[in-house]
Image (cartoon, rainbow, N blue to C red):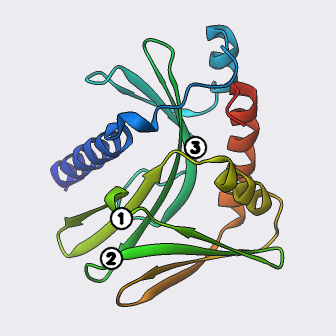
Amino acid sequence: MILCRLIFLSIFIQGFLISACRNADDKVPAKNNIQSDAFATAVINLVHIRDETSGISWYRYPGYPANVNKNGFYLYFGRSDSGVLYSRLRIQYVLGDDADMQRLVISASGHEFTIQFDRRKVQSGVLGSIHYQWYDVNPDMEIVKILSVIAESSSVYIRIEGNRYNLKRQITDKEIEALKNMLIIGAQIGFF
């Protein structure tokens, strides 16, 4: 049982780091050249994962899914050894079988937003009988505006639409609070 958990954790970390580092064009330096001390202060309470191969330290909010077999909707940040900063939005979900995710529809505060997925950036995997997919991208300012609306909403639903079926779920209060805090940290770092 312990060995299975260790193998699963290893698979997750490899998938997480590979997906986060896959596209060099997703590098987005922060608007301001933030000092190391200011960055360290901003991310002090975040979970830290170091990728020695790419030289990037990744930071995520405590309580975000640590496994790929969990549904998730969250922001996370990275910083390379050379000081390049990364802002990432990750949408992951578990399926009964393989599907082709095409778009995300968000209902928040009486507004409806649609994010079309770039199919080249949709990734998937299988762990036993569990199929999961994730979309991990640099959020542009339009997505940041949507995330800001979500962070200020009391009730948010997301619907992931694919070629065979839709997956709908409510974003939890904990996810909304975490998103709000990550947006604040992102502003401190200079992303937003």
Nearest the viewer among 86 and 132 is: 86
Q: Does residue 162 sit above or below 31 in this rendering?
A: below
Residue beneath the point at 36% across and 56% down? 121
**Horizontal arrangement in the rendering, residue 94 relative to residue 140 (left or right):** left
- Front residue of 130/7: it is 130
Residue toward you, 27 or 99: 27
- Please, what is the three-letter code of the amino acid marked with disc 2? Asp
Which residue has dot 1 on it?
Answer: 119
Q: Callout 2 environment at 10 Å: few (<14), some (14 to 19), or many (20+)?
A: some
Q: What is the x, y in percent for residue 188?
A: 75, 27
Mark 2: which secondary structure? Answer: loop
Look at discs 3 and 2 and give the one toward the viewer.
2
Residue 63: in sight, yes or no? no
For marks 1 and 3, the one nearer the N-term is 3
Which amino acid type is marked by label 1?
Arg
- Return the x and y of residue 110 as percentages of the image width and height: 83, 79
**Mark 3–mark 2 distance (CA, rounded to whole Å):** 29 Å
Position of residue 76 measured from the top left corner of the image (x, y, whole percent): 55, 41
Q: Nearer the viewer, mark 2 or mark 1?
A: 1
Residue 157 in the figure: left or right of residue 149: left
What quarter of the picture does the C terminus occupy? Answer: top right
Residue holding disc 2: 100
From the image, tell me which residue sits under label 3.
62
Counting residues from the N terminus, which is met first, the one under dot 2 or under dot 1?
A: 2
Q: Can see residue 74?
A: yes
Of circles 1 and 3, the one toward us is 1
**Kind of element beneath mark 3:** loop
Looking at the image, the residue that sits furthest to the bottom is 164
In which quarter of the view is residue 42 placed? top right
Discs 2, 1 touching: Cβ within 8 Å: yes
The answer to whether residue 34 is above or below residue 27 is: above
- With 163 as the anchor, is 107 left or right in this view? right
